[in-house]
Image (cartoon, rainbow, N blue to C red):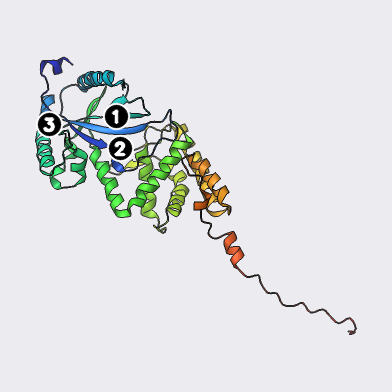
Amino acid sequence: VDQFAAKPLTLRPLFFTQGSYAYRTWNSPAHRPPQHIDLDDGMYLPLSVFENADSPKLASAALFAGVDAMLGELCRAQGWNLIRDKKTCCRIDLTTGAHIDIPLYAIPDGDVRLLEARAASYKYMTEHGQIALARAFDSQPEDFRLSSDKVWLAHRTKGWHQSDPRQLHDWFELKARLYGDQLRRVCRYVKAWRDWYEKDSPLSSIALMAHVVAVFEDQNQDRQRDDLMLLAVAERLPTLLRDPVPNPTNPGQMLDDSLSDAQRQRAVDAAAEWHRNLDRAMGQVFDTQRVVKILMASFGPRMPNRPDLVSIEGGEETVMSVAPAVLPTREIPNRSVSG
């Protein structure tokens, strides 16, 4: 904090919206409380603040202390709560069933100036004069490409490490362009199941999204049918969850390496039960009200209680449409004839 006080900052940080809101896979909480609406807004500062042109030298703990102090004043003024126990971000509890996570990044000064200039030229500015960095990034001009090895993330106790959230963002956006909005919808369905079956699930959203992408890449289902694609994902999910899922942009890193063996097995068991329920609802039950009841047990009350929206195909309908077999008339022997 003293380093900040000795050298007052005259810069304007850049903010980049991350997470499910940026991926457009955002759901309302299934259990509120304790589940929150989760917003992620990365804060980017120039490396010169940290007195080194290539990597940050200022202790990350000092940066967190300075940002915590500023956010603390904002929280007191707004009646919010500042959470200081998150290792890779500052968290603001809005006390309305939502929180904002603010990870802290450092990027080269030249990239900051380029982003500011290009955002202004493309008119990616908010009404308050702030740079709409997410819009600038999502426009995908090459000018907005940052070198991933020059993006540094602060950790409260472990210093700095290279981490670029844009890599995963770009990977998922590429898959969404390839498979269309159905990919986003199926990801939301899977996350909705996760949030309902366990109030504080350790399964990360990005790990589940990677599993969904894996099924899309292997599956030849009719892409017009969300229900069939979801069933295909549910069928594969127990197997996929048994092993750690590698980060598609950094195979040496696992997206779910924080899961304990017990947590992983619990997730596998829950996914297997979920698949059995979906399979029953979609292929073994021919009463629309029962179908909805099974689905509500899998997704919770956010699933509309609308049996009128359920179409029954196959099964009983198919049986009833087939004419009964015509058997040949059985000839009864004439008892008056001997032999």
Which structural element holds mark 2? helix
Residue under pointer 1: 101
Residue 113 percent across, percent down from the top left: 9, 36
Quadrant housing the C terminus: bottom right
Q: Which mark is residue 54?
A: 3
Q: Quick one: SS at disc 1?
A: strand
Give the residue at mark 2.
Answer: 19
Q: Tell me the distance, in whole angstroms, between the alpha carbons under discs 3 and 1.
A: 26 Å
Q: Residues within 10 Å of mark 3 (few under 14, many from 20)?
A: some
Q: In which quarter of the image is residue 205?
A: top left
Q: In this view, does 204 lie to the left or right of 315?
A: left
Image coordinates for residue 171, horizontal then vertical, percent: 27, 46
Q: Label 2 sits on what residue type? A: Gly
**For this rendering, which residue is in front, 34 or 309?**
309
Residue 321 to residue 299: above or below? below
Q: Examine the image and state in which quarter residue 148 appears.
A: top left
SS for dot 3: loop
| Inter-mark Cα distance, 1 to 2 | 10 Å
Residue type indicated by callout 3: Asp
Q: Which of marks 3 and 1 is nearer the N terminus?
A: 3
Residue depicted at 31% across the width and 33% down the height: 39
Residue 169 falls left or right of residue 313: left
